[in-house]
Amino acid sequence: MYESLKKFRQIEFGVILFAFVVYITRRLFYIAADFDSDVTRVEDLGVQPFIIWRNLASYDHVLNTIFPTTAAAILFFLAWYLFHYEAFPRWRNKELKQKYIFYTSLVASAILVFASVFVYSYMKRYWDFRYDIFHEIVGFKVFSLFRKLHLITNTYAGIIVILLYEAVAQVFYHNQKLYNQFKQPKHQFFGYFILSISLALIIFWMLQGSIANLVINGRGTFQSILIIMLSIGFHYLFFKLIIPYYAKLDYNKLDNTLYAFFGFCAYILLGIVLMAIWMIIVRDYDSFLTLYAIPNIIGLSSAGLRWAFFNEKQNFEVKISQTTAELNNLRSQINPHFLFNALNTLYSISLKEQAERTSDGIQKLGDMMRFMLNENHQERIPLSKEVEYLENYIAIQRMRIDENHNIEIKVNIQQPEKDIFIAPMLLNPFIENAFKHGISFRKPSWIYITLTQDTQRLYFKVHNSTHPKNEQDTEQKNHGIGLENVKKRLELIYPNRHTLDIQVSDNDYFVSLILGIY
C-alpha cells in the first residue's frame, strides 16, 4: 500500500510539473499573439509606427511579460512542492524530531507564494488602447496594476489555492488507503471520481487559465476566503450534529421516515425564508449566496460525502483497538504448534538417513520460519508468499510418508497471476488439520487440496480421510483449537467477505473456504 501511494505521488509530481510547463508556454504565446494583434490593429487605423513604439517605449516584452510570468509560475510551483512533499507530510506523520524542517518548509512555502505574487505584480506591465476626445484609437498606453494592499490579499489567495489542492489530495490518499484495506467498490468509485474531476480542472487550467484564475485580487479574494471559512463551519455542523442525528433514526418505521422528510423540507423552507428576508432588508442577492447559500451547499455535500465514504473508518478503528490483543493471541497459538511438529519430523528423518532429503527439508523449514518471522505479523501479505509457505509445508509432510504406505495426496494450487493480498496463515491450519487427522500408516488414507482464484474470490478446498485417534493421544485434546482460531480471525478480518463450509462424517472431513479478494 505504501509503495503504490509513493509511486502515485511520483506520477503526481510529473503531472503537476507538466501542467505548469504547458501553462507557461501557452500563456506566453497567447500574450505575444495578443500584443501583435493589437499593434496590427492600431497600424491599420493609420497611426504612425513611431507614435506606436514611442507609446510602448516603457514596455519590454522580456522584462514585463516573459520574466514575471515564468518566474511567478516557478516560485509558485516550488511553494506547492515544499508544502505538499515536505511540510504537510511531516505534520501529518507527527515527526516531532523534525520540527525544525517542518516549520522551515512551511515558512519557506509561504515566502515563495509571496515572492511569486510580488514578482508578477511588480514586474508585469499591461498595455491598452489610448483614445482621443472622439473615442478614436490614437495609440497605446502602458500601465501597472501593482498595489501594496493587493500583495497581502493575493498571497492569501495563493496560499488558499495550495491548501485546497492539499485538501483534495489528502481526501484522495485517505480514500485509497481505505480501498486497499477494505476493498469496497464505493471507495474505488470515489477515488476515480476525485481523480477525474481533478484532472479535468488541471487540464482546464492548462488550456484556459490565467494568473487571475489562481490569484484572485481585491473583493474576490475576501469573498473566496469568507466562503471557505463558512463552508468549513457548515461542514462540521452537518457532520458532527445533524447527519449523525438522522443516521440514528430507524427508517423501517414510517414515523421516522416522515420525520426525516419533513426535517429536510423545513431546511429548504428555512433557506427560502432567510433569502426573502435578506432581499427585503439588504437587497443584495450576491451577498446572500456568499454568506449562506454557497457555504450551505458545500458544507452539506462535503459532510454527506465524508459520512458516506469515511465514517466507517472510525468504527473500524474502534473495533480493531478492541480485537488487536485477541488477534495477537490467536496468532501466537497457531505458530509454535506446527514448528515443534515439523522439527520432530525432521529429527526422525535425520535418524533414519543422511541424505539430500534431510537438507532439503531443513531448507524448506528455514524458509517457513523466515516467513513466520517476517510475513506472519503483517496485516496483509501477497498470496504468492502464502502459497510458497503451503507448498513447503506439504513437501515436508510428504517426507515422513513411506512410498509403501497406502496414502494418496493430490495437490492442485493455482499460482496467482496478479498481486493478491490476504491475511497471513489463514489457509495452512486446514492443511495441517488434514495431515494431522487424515493420515494413518495402518489404513488407506487420502488428502485432496485445491486452491484457485478469479478476479473476485479465492476458492480453497481440503478433503481428507479421517481416522479415530487413541484416547491417550495428547493431540486429541488440542483437536479443533487451530480451526477455531481461524474462524475467529475470519470473522474479525473478513466480516461478510468469506464463506466457510465444514462437513464432517465418520470417514472424511471436507473444508471449503471462499474468500473475497476484490
Image (tube, helix red, strand yellow):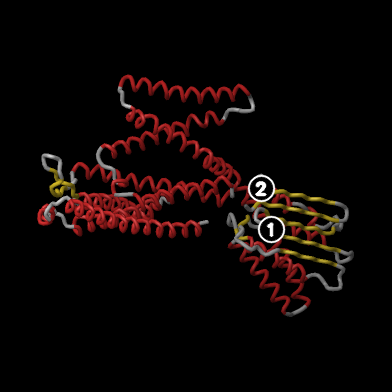
Asked which secondary structure carries label 1, the reply is: strand
- Residue 406: image quadrant is bottom right
x and y percentages locating residue 110 in the rendered image: 28, 49
x and y percentages locating residue 470 in the rendered image: 86, 57
Q: What residue type is labelled 1?
A: Gln
Are dots 1 and 2 in contact, CB under 8 Å?
A: no
Residue 95 visible, this orientation? no
Residue at far right of view: 443
Q: 104 and 330: which one is in front?
A: 104
Asked which secondary structure carries label 2, the reply is: loop
Q: In this view, does 315 lie above or below 480?
A: above
How many numbered marks does the figure carry?
2
x and y percentages locating residue 57 in the rendered image: 12, 55
Q: What residue type is labelled 2?
A: Arg
- 10 Å neighbourhood of mark 1: few (<14), some, or many (≥20)? some
Mark identifier at residue 453: 1
- Residue 233: image quadrant is top left
In the figure, is residue 31 to the left or right of 448?
left
Mark identifier at residue 205: none
Residue 329 visible, this orientation? yes
Q: Which residue is rendered at x = 39% and y = 22% of the image? A: 274
Q: In this view, does 391 lie above or below 204?
A: below
Q: Which residue is rendered at x = 44% and y = 57% of the image? A: 9
Q: 300 and 319: which one is in front?
A: 300
